[in-house]
Amino acid sequence: MARPQEQRRLWTPEEDDKLIEFKRNYPDRPWPGTADLAGLDRSDKSCWERWNNHLKPGVNKENFSEEEDDIIIHIQRTEHRNKWAFMAENYLQGRTANAIKNRWNNHLNKMLTNIGDLGRYLLTDDETSDHSDLEDGVKPLMAEYASLI
């Protein structure tokens, strides 16, 4: 039987401040025991995730650019596939492995999966609809996707 999952509490600005201050004072301190030493009622894993995915200086929280999406798609097609940390470290500095994984699973993979249906809609012989501006952006993606099939 699965263990009941605890309700996750949102991080408060005060907790964020405590963790930031702790990491400022002890940047090289190992994560075990961090929550207690920082005065947080959190697990060490929760502190690690909050720091590395949200609070760490240099984390890019902006929307992904088309160039970043192209990099993710390209690397996902190579032998590196689901190596999110590899992508973050070597190709998308400032992005976290978690953010890259979420971008792939929640947007890019679905877009590539559904692009065949989109292409059939856009590339019809129906002269009553003008989707030429959309076709220009979709044709290269469809060609790349077709090469995978």
Image (tube, rainbow, N blue to C red):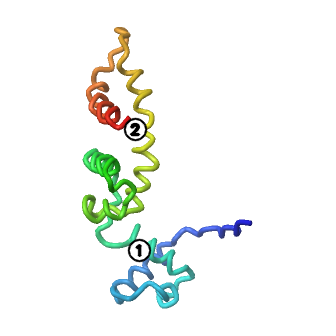
Count neighbours of disc 2 (C-alpha within 10 A) and say few if under 14, some if 14 to 19, many if 20 or more. some
| Tag 1 secondary structure | helix
Residue 114: x and y in percent read 44, 34
Name the quarter where the N terminus is drawn: bottom right
Tell me how many marks there are.
Answer: 2
- SS at mark 2? helix
The earlier-in-sequence mark between 2 and 1 is 1
Residue at the image point whose x is 39% and y is 56% from the top? 82
Residue 95 quadrant: bottom left
Residue 20 position by quadrant = bottom left
The residue beneath circle 2 is 112
Question: Is 74 in front, or is 38?
Answer: 74
Q: CA distance from mark 2 to mark 1?
A: 32 Å
Q: Position of residue 41 (x, y in %)?
A: 57, 82
Foreground residue, 66 or 144?
Answer: 144
Left or right: where 67 falls relative to 124: left
**Residue at (66, 67) in percent of width and height:** 5
Q: Which residue: 41% across, 56% down?
A: 101
Q: What kind of residue is marked 1?
A: Trp
Residue 26 in the image: x percent, y percent?
Answer: 36, 89
* Numbered circle sitting on residue 144: none
Q: Residues within 10 Å of mark 1 (few under 14, many from 20)?
A: some
Q: Quadrant of the C terminus?
A: top left
Residue at the limit of the structure toward the right, as seen here: 1
The reply, left or right, for residue 6 in relation to residue 110 is: right
For label 1, the residue is 51
Q: Is residue 89 above or below residue 100?
A: below
State the residue in front, 103 or 11: 103
38 w.r.t. 129: above or below: below
